[in-house]
């Protein structure tokens, strides 16, 4: 695929070409566990679908293309992708993580991987200097999320990359933004990770995870781990993500345009204490958002007066469905403290019960605003 193609074009074509045997324009779903060999070890590139499958290979090439990387890898979920990255490390290794991340990432790091001897420091990375103090001789990885889930905080990827020694792997969870908004590999990151369950899939019909990267050795290590651990997606799921990605650029434009209007509406609403959205001038990192993000994205978090008001609001919307997850065409609303981020309760990453998170869909914005107006009335 021509590297010079723009994201809108790559979203439709990267990793995909008409099936040479039949001319089928859509990537076939190779629903098979194994592949016939003519002699032991003689095959057409595929042996067993945990190791590799042509539908998955198309998705892996697609995410590589979208993120401006050489290599892609697909997983059964975002967390399976994160877990596989972490198996690059050894007991005693130290990881620096931003102090606001997806609840499942926190749970995996502190409740599972810490038992295997990995050490995690949770640091306010909005202040790049804070990174210097946290760096230790054993630091092997810097884990970034931007914007963060759920507080919509940004970190300056190139500024942080510049502060870590060469041997520290910089991984960025790009789930909230998608490559239509930012491409961390181009900003110096070593690995980009996605929950393709969200914007890449885009239709709330599949759970998946993806990685993209440039380094050949790192790719060989991750590919080995992908097969050795086995957290791989099935061909049907790969097909669904590939199909979702085709409209990524269009969807992100509409998600962002709708979210900006809704953020402005909420900012003027008396029942809303604060709106956290990188597209608003009131966002403390508005300048960084303008510099690092092509669009402000479809995620908004707000603070309301008390936890009761938060619960009331999310129970009263009709179009905004009360549900976990995000990034689909339909609008969702939730209370992170009681839902997606319950795992951080009692930790320094605990989020307030007054926080409401909105995943703004691509419905007509006037209908969405009316829904919120009625819910807040
Ligand atoms: C959902 C999510 C994940 C986890 O992905 P799954 O596909 O649910 O395993 C990781 N990071 C972020 C930012 C997410 O929103």
Image (spheres, rainbow, N blue to C red):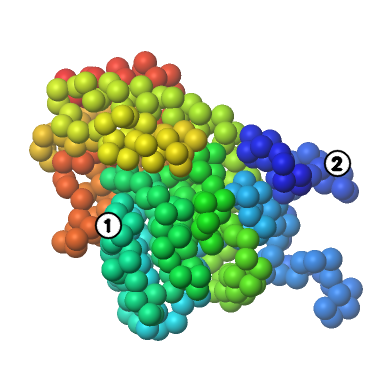
Q: Nearer the viewer, residue 110 or 160?
A: 160
State left or right for residue 371 relative to residue 296: left
* Contact between labelled residues 2 and 1, with CB atoms less than 8 Å apart: no
The picture quadrant where one finds residue 219 is bottom right
Q: Nearer the viewer, residue 30 or 339?
A: 339
Checking the image for residue 332, the label placed there is none
Label 2 element class: loop
Residue 262 image point, x, y percent: 33, 24
Residue 118 image point, x, y percent: 36, 78
Picture residue at 58% right of the left edge, 40% below the top:
244
Total number of numbered discs in the rendering: 2
Q: Is residue 223 above or below residue 377?
A: below
Residue 183 image point, x, y percent: 54, 47
Label 1 element class: loop
Residue placed under numbered mark 1 in the picture? 124
State left or right for residue 333 relative to residue 79: left
Residue 376 image point, x, y percent: 19, 24
Give the alpha-carbon distance from disc 1 to disc 2, as whole Å.
52 Å
Q: Is residue 62 above or below residue 85?
A: above
For label 2, the crowd category at 10 Å Cα-Cα, with few meaning under 14, some 14 to 19 and many 20 or more, is few
Q: Nearer the viewer, residue 375 or 2?
A: 2
Picture residue at 57% right of the left edge, 51% below the top:
186
Asked if disc 1 is less than 8 Å from ligand 1, the answer is no
For label 1, the crowd category at 10 Å Cα-Cα, with few meaning under 14, some 14 to 19 and many 20 or more, is some
Work out whether mark 1 precedes mark 2 in sequence or the reverse, and give the earlier one: 2
Residue placed under numbered mark 2 in the picture? 23
**Mark 1 or 2, closer to the camera:** 1
Picture residue at 60% right of the left edge, 41% below the top:
245
The picture quadrant where one finds residue 122 is bottom left
Q: Is residue 259 visible?
A: yes
Picture residue at 27% right of the left edge, 57% below the top:
124
Q: Is residue 358 visible?
A: no
């Amino acid at each position: 695929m021509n590297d010079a193609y723009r994201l809108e074009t790559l979203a439709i074509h990267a990793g995909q070409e008409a099936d040479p045997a039949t001319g089928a324009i859509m990537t076939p779903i190779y629903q098979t566990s194994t592949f016939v060999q003519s002699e032991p070890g003689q095959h057409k590139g595929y042996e067993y679908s945990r190791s590799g499958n042509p539908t998955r290979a198309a998705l892996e090439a697609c995410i590589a293309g979208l993120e401006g990387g050489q290599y892609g890898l697909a997983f059964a979920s975002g967390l399976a992708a994160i877990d596989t990255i972490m198996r690059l490390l050894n007991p005693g290794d130290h990881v620096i993580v931003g102090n606001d991340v997806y609840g499942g990432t926190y749970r995996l790091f502190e409740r599972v991987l810490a038992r295997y001897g990995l050490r995690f420091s949770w640091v306010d990375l909005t202040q790049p200097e804070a990174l210097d103090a946290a760096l230790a001789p054993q630091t092997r990885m810097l884990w970034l999320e931007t914007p963060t889930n759920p507080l919509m905080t940004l970190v300056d990827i190139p500024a942080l990359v510049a502060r870590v020694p060469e041997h520290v792997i910089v991984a960025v969870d790009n789930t909230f933004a998608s490559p239509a908004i930012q491409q961390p590999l181009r900003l110096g990151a070593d690995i980009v990770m996605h929950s393709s369950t969200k914007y890449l899939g885009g239709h709330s019909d599949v759970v998946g995870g993806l990685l993209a990267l440039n380094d050949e050795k790192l790719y060989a290590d991750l590919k080995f781990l992908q097969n050795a651990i086995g957290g791989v997606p099935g061909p049907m799921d790969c097909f669904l993500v590939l199909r979702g990605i085709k409209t990524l650029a269009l969807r992100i434009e509409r998600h962002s345009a709708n979210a900006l209007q809704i953020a402005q509406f909420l900012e003027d609403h008396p029942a809303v204490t604060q709106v956290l959205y990188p597209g608003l001038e009131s966002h403390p990192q508005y300048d960084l958002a303008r510099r690092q993000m092509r669009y402000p994205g479809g995620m908004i978090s707000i603070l309301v007066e008390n936890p009761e008001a938060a619960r009331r609001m999310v129970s009263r919307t009709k179009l905004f469905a009360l549900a976990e997850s995000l990034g689909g065409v339909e609008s969702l609303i939730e209370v992170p403290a009681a839902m997606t981020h319950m795992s951080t309760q009692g930790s320094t990453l605990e989020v307030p019960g007054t926080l409401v998170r909105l995943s703004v869909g691509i419905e007509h914005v006037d209908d969405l605003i009316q829904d919120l107006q009625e819910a807040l009335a």
